[in-house]
Amino acid sequence: MNTPSALEQCRNCDTPLQGEYCHQCGQQNQQYLRSIFAVVGNLFGEIGHWDSRFYRTLSGLMLRPGFLTKEFVNGRHASYVPPLRLYFFISLIAFLTLSLTIDYEAMTAPGNEVFPTAGTEQPATPSTSEARQPPPPVSLDFGDARISLPFLGEAEQEKLNEKLRHLSQNPKILVRKLVSLAPQIILLMMPFWALYLKIIYIFKRHYYLEHLTAALHTHAFLLLSLTILTAMSQMADWLTARTGMAVFDQISDWMETILLMWMATYMLFTQKIFYNQGWGRTLIKFALSAIGYLALLSLAFVAMVIIGVMTA
């Protein structure tokens, strides 16, 4: 970063500089065209500058329902990480953790509930020679299932269903694609969820961006909670495998139950605290929110599967 002594005039308006920012136009005295190493170093510098602001944001996010959203709406921005940046950061960590811990082999194994193998039966007591043989190829039994989209021509429709048949024989490809699409789908879903909140709270006179801020904070909380649940489960499995002690699984199950209960309680109290309505209306709108979110999530999942099949 250049200092005023190295560059005495603002590059934007040529005003003599008196500090890091131009007092006339507000542009920062910084050189943006520099080596990639300088860019990476600046990125880590900004992360390091979060310090107490980052930890203050995390504690508010996890322990105080609706707090960060109210602080942002009330104009207290400098003390906390901005909502969109916070969501992107947690989303990156969450889906990176998911992609590293998900067991694609287990998800596409024969007999798995999610991806059952057509016509595959597991013998109750396999012989030694049978046990040594490799498992049969995994495939999805889609039968005569076809995807019909009105905006596709006949040739494109046939190409799409050919992909569907190919993915039925290679389910791991589809699973990986869906995992990679999940962050984008959730982000695209966010504005529609904020619009739904705007509708059910139409008489509260909140701006749409206030609902969007609440949506960003609650989704950041949910993603971070799911990341913690995944990490706890993986750690418990690792400790149990190394020590042979089932107590780690029991502790993990106990902590996961507490966190899941807190997630549900958190969402309820967020609506109560941020929208500031009585418990009767809050409970009714919480139920409406749950129904609407499940419907929106179902539509998003269907869209994700269709996009996954089309782009895999």
Image: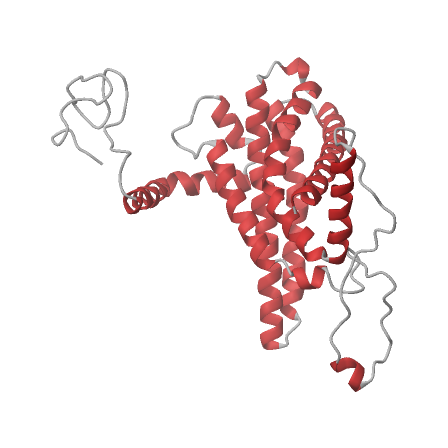
Horizontal and vertical percent position of residue 280: 75, 25
| Quarter holding residue 297 | top right
Q: Is residue 36 above or below residue 241?
A: above
Q: Check the image and name the residue furthest to the left.
A: 5
Give the number of marks. 0
Q: Nearer the viewer, residue 184 or 119?
A: 119
Q: Check the image and name the residue furthest to the front.
A: 155
Answer with left or right where residue 236 lies relative to residue 2. right
Q: What residue is rendered at 39% in x and 38% in y? A: 53
Q: What residue is rendered at 51% in x and 43% in y? A: 90
Q: Check the image and name the residue furthest to the bottom.
A: 128
Q: Nearer the viewer, residue 312 or 237?
A: 312
Answer with left or right where residue 44 lies relative to residue 201. left
| Color style of the picture | secondary structure
Q: What residue is rendered at 55% in x and 48% in y? A: 94
Q: Is residue 139 above or below residue 8?
A: below
Q: What residue is rendered at 67% in x and 65% in y? A: 250
Answer with left or right where residue 299 lies relative to residue 256. right
Q: Nearer the viewer, residue 77 or 129?
A: 129
Q: Quadrant of the N terminus?
A: top left
Horizontal and vertical percent position of residue 55: 43, 43
Horizontal and vertical percent position of residue 185: 63, 37
Horizontal and vertical percent position of residue 216: 56, 32
